[in-house]
Image (cartoon, rainbow, N blue to C red):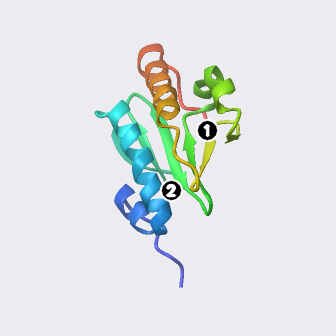
Amino acid sequence: MQKKKPSSVEEYIEELPEIAQSRINELRAILKSVAPKAKEGLKWGKPAFESVTILFAYSAHKSHLSFTPTGPAMKPFEKELSEYTTKQDSVQFQYDKPLPEDLIRKIAEYRKEDAEEKGAKWKY
């Protein structure tokens, strides 16, 4: 039997293992504090925040969380991100280490400003 796809962010989180639920809720709270008026929903099966465009997405995996603010939003923070595994548009945070709240907040604020004030589009 095929597993039903979640239809909301809450369903997405409820289906995760306990450690992932705890960590993803931490990440979600940080992102909500940066973009409290943004619409939250699922994009490509992942939770995402959207205002004038998609601001950022996030997801849980077997051993890490992924935060996807887009590559251009990560560029100014390359030095601070050097201790984390990064992909073109995302950064991974391992479950066994504390989330770098200040860094996540700075990147999210940068992405929000870039999108809402400078018209940067989502490139995924």
The quarter of the picture where residue 22 lies is bottom left
Determine crowd level at label 1: few under 14, some 14-19, many 20+ residues with C-alpha closer than 10 A.
few
- Element under label 1? loop
Q: Left of 28 or right of it: where is 71?
A: right
- Tell me what residue is drawn at x 40 percent, y 28 percent: 52
- Tell me what residue is drawn at x 43 percent, y 62 percent: 12
The numbered mark, 2 or 1, whose residue comes first in the sequence reads 2
Q: Nearer the viewer, residue 43 or 64?
A: 64
Q: Left of 2 or right of it: where is 72?
A: right
Q: From what the image shows, is residue 46 above or below residue 35?
A: below
- Element under label 2? loop
Q: Where does label 2 land, which residue? A: 45
Q: From what the image shows, is residue 95 above or below residue 11?
A: above
What is the CA distance from the residue labelled 2 to the residue labelled 1?
14 Å
Residue 94: image x %, image y %? 61, 52
Q: Nearer the viewer, residue 51 or 112?
A: 112
Residue 45: image x %, image y %? 50, 56
Q: From what the image shows, is residue 46 above or below residue 91?
A: below
Q: Residue furthest bottom?
A: 1
Q: Which quadrant is the C terminus positioned in?
A: top right
Q: Residue furthest front?
A: 97
- Tell me what residue is drawn at x 56 percent, y 55 percent: 95
Residue 99: image x %, image y %? 51, 44
Question: Which amino acid, by three-letter code, is at mark 2?
Answer: Gly
Count of numbered tags: 2
Q: Which mark is residue 124?
A: 1
User: Can I make out residue 5 in this image?
Assistant: no
Question: Which amino acid, by three-letter code, is at mark 1?
Answer: Tyr
User: Can I make out residue 10 in this image?
Assistant: yes
Residue 25: image x %, image y %? 40, 52
